[in-house]
């Protein structure tokens, strides 16, 4: 099993791998990270270069028509040729101009690009955030917690969503509109996270500082700042950051996990026990933590334990077909074919229902 108490968690706003759109499938590509360039200023992140505006003018704006027809052309322009033909790349947290040059983007960059081009096309556009846990990845002794963002477009009385990962991301709640300042803070937070795991984690410092400057009440950024300080050998600063995150969000899992680990490592058993109890209360209410535990149990061959965790995840949230797919697989490994079929049928029904809700 993944042992949370010895891992660092980054709330990293990127989507799950290999996404798709309602327009056309977007292939998975090799992740791209910009070379060692100066950190862009906030006003540069969403700036549309003249060449891109000219292409947008010709293929989207000049045809005129209703707001909905412009939006449809914009979506086609983003994902299809002879438009941009953007490709998904999980680690490609880029500015709008960098995305245009490379034709690569993750969900955050897709959102920046969509919002910027929609506004250039005369549409009302804004970022949206889903703060439910949607995916995990383990690597470089860090457990990454992935949140998700997408673009909201208002046309008349309709609020529409453009989402590169709509077929893969599940949230318990609808996305929440966010300010440009918050969206930019997510960009700098993401870049800090990408640089953190590289050869020179100090390069992440200005990005993390900018994220906190733009969104000083963003608890996940404070938790990530703690991870960065710990990686740079400054446990007291890391402790300060984790406590700041918890002051803003008492249930912040990243801060709680890392505080428990920090106090265990420095021998502060009294504080470790306090925050371990708080962490346990958060984890037991989080269906996606239960899902993670179930997957970990399966990897260890503990299929009975996996069933328990999948069932607990379902009790907490019955709307994610992945829980039922996992449960069906665990039941199959235990030879319980009837229960496996029942779980698989429920997973298929949820998949159809979710797909119908997006159309």
Image (cartoon, rainbow, N blue to C red):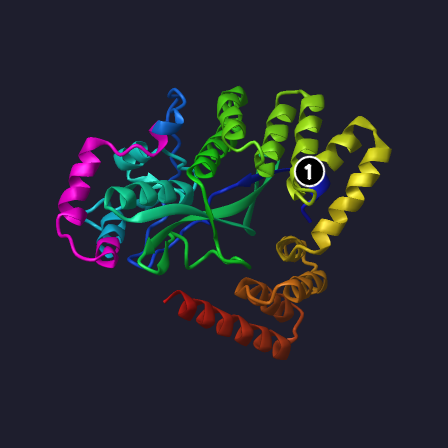
Res 89 quadrant in image: top left
Residue 112 visible in rendering: yes
Closer to us: 314 or 142: 314
Res 358 quadrant in image: bottom left
Residue 82 visible in rendering: no
Q: Which residue is found at the position 57% from the left and 77% from the top?
A: 341
Measured as percent of width and height from the top left, residue 53 is found at 20, 37
Quadrant (top left/top right/bottom left/bottom right) for the C terminus: bottom left
Furthest residue in direction front, as rendered: 157
Q: Which residue is found at the position 49% from the left and 72% from the top?
A: 348
In this image, 144 relative to 21: left or right? right
Closer to us: 271 or 291: 271
Q: Which residue is found at the position 57% from the left and 37% from the top?
A: 218
Measured as percent of width and height from the top left, residue 237 is found at 67, 23
Residue on which the image places disc 1: 246
Look at the magenta stretch and give its main secondary structure: helix
Res 87 quadrant in image: top left
The magenta stretch is 44-71
Measured as percent of width and height from the top left, residue 150 is found at 41, 49
Q: Secondary structure at mark 1?
A: helix
Q: Which residue is found at the position 83% from the left and 39% from the top?
A: 273
Instruction: Count the marks.
Output: 1
């Amino acid at each position: 099993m993944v042992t949370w108490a010895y891992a660092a968690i980054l709330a990293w706003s990127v989507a799950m791998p290999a996404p798709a759109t309602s327009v056309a499938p977007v292939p998975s590509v090799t992740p791209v990270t910009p070379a060692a360039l100066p950190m862009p200023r906030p006003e540069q992140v969403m700036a549309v270069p003249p060449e891109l505006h000219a292409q947008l003018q010709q293929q989207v704006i000049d045809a005129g028509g209703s707001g909905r027809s412009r939006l449809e052309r914009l979506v086609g322009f983003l994902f299809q040729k002879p438009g941009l033909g953007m490709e998904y790349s999980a680690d490609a947290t880029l500015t709008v101009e960098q995305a245009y040059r490379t034709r690569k983007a993750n969900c955050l960059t897709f959102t920046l690009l969509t919002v910027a081009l929609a506004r250039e096309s005369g549409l009302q556009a804004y970022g949206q955030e889903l703060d439910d846990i949607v995916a995990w990845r383990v690597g470089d002794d860090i457990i990454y917690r992935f949140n998700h963002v997408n673009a909201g477009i208002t046309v008349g009385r309709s609020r529409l969503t453009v989402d590169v990962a709509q077929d893969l991301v599940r949230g318990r709640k609808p996305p929440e509109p966010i300010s440009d300042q918050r969206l930019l803070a997510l960009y700098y937070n993401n870049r800090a996270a990408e640089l953190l795991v590289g050869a020179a984690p100090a390069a992440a410092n200005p990005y993390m500082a900018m994220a906190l400057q733009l969104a000083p009440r963003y608890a996940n950024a404070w938790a990530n700042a703690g991870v960065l300080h710990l990686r740079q050998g400054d446990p007291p600063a890391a402790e300060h950051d984790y406590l700041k995150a918890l002051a803003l969000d008492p249930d912040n899992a990243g801060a709680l996990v890392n505080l428990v680990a920090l106090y265990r490592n420095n021998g502060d058993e009294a504080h470790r026990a306090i925050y371990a109890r708080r962490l346990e209360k958060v984890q037991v209410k989080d269906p996606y933590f239960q899902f993670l535990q179930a997957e970990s149990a399966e990897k260890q061959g503990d299929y009975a334990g996996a069933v328990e965790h999948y069932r607990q995840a379902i009790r907490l949230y019955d709307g994610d077909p992945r829980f039922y797919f996992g449960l069906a697989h665990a039941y199959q490994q235990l030879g319980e074919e009837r229960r496996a079929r029942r779980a698989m049928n429920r997973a298929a029904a949820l998949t159809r229902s979710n797909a119908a809700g997006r159309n």
